[in-house]
Image (spheres, rainbow, N blue to C red):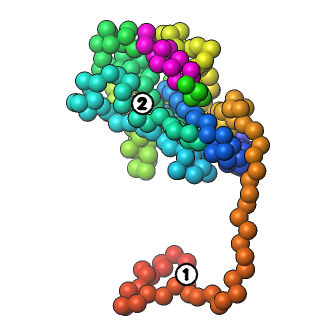
Amino acid sequence: MKRKDYDAHLDLLQRELVAMQNWLRHSGARVVVLFEGRDAAGKGGVIGSISRVLNPRSCRVVALPKPSEREATQWYFQRYIGALPAAGEMVLFDRSWYNRAGVEKVMGYCTQAQYQQFLQQVPVFEKLLADDGVLLLKYWLSVDQVEQEQRFAERAADPLKRWKLSPVDLQSRPKYSEYGEARDAMLRASHTKYAPWTLVDFNDQRNGRLNLIRHLLDNLPITQVPDNAPQLEELTAPLHKERFKGGLKPIKDKFSGK
């Protein structure tokens, strides 16, 4: 898809996202969206496309770091509970509690007993969320290994993207098949009627983003609510330039050519 066409489609979808947030605020709904998938699949890009146009006071992106020593002794789901939304809020999880079924399982960061306990508890945990009225959407972003390797190489070569390539990513590269097996086991254990998984092809990131956002909007019970645009009355007093007292001045503009 050409950039011009992509931008045109994305603009329309982002307008719908703004309308969705207006509905969210009026309805008091609580929405949780989980973004899981292969390393370098494009989770950050699609999350940015969604959150960029929304009010951050009611749309939060959550990307939790490695658990602290104290958190590691808590019930596994405990640190995620504090990030769940209140009325009128949407939370976008850039990876979520499913870390235990993916990277922790494959890389040996949890025990087999902890892994099995997670697979047993996660449907119950998500049923509690659904029963309390939380709207939960779960997305798995898929990408072929050839495409994944190309993206890794691009990140390694670009100083602005190098931070995206973590030591765990590098260690995980030979384990593509193992991650696939862990994913399939995760889907079998946690794909339920009240919290189903949706698989999205992200070999083409532009198409993947558009398809995911379209699906997200189509699967929320959005209703039209009034969008009262503010009316700005014309100022009758003269308009002033910005001035600073005490000799303070803004830095010199080096890029406008003035």
Residue 91's place in the image compared with 236, above or below, is above
Mark 1, Cα crowd under 10 Å, few <14 / some 14-19 / many 20+, is: few
Q: Say if residue 13 shows up in the picture.
A: yes
Residue at mark 1 to residue at mark 2: CA–CA distance = 51 Å
Question: What element does badge 2 sit on?
Answer: helix
- Residue at horizontal 58 percent and vertical 13 percent from the top: 192
- Image quadrant occupied by the N terminus: top right
Mark 1 vs mark 2: give the one in front. 2
Q: Say if residue 206 shows up in the picture.
A: no
Q: Is residue 211 left or right of residue 135?
A: right
The quarter of the picture where residue 137 lies is: top right
What residue span does the magenta drawing correspond to?
A: 119-131
> Mark 2 highlights which residue?
81
Q: Is residue 98 left or right of residue 5?
A: left
x and y percentages locating residue 179 in the rendered image: 44, 17
The reply to whether callout 1 and callout 2 are in contact (CB within 8 Å) is no
Q: Is residue 130 magenta?
A: yes
Front one among 23 and 122 = 23
Q: Which amino acid type is marked by label 2?
A: Ile
> Mark 1 highlights which residue?
257
Question: What element does badge 1 sit on?
Answer: loop
- Image quadrant occupied by the C terminus: bottom right
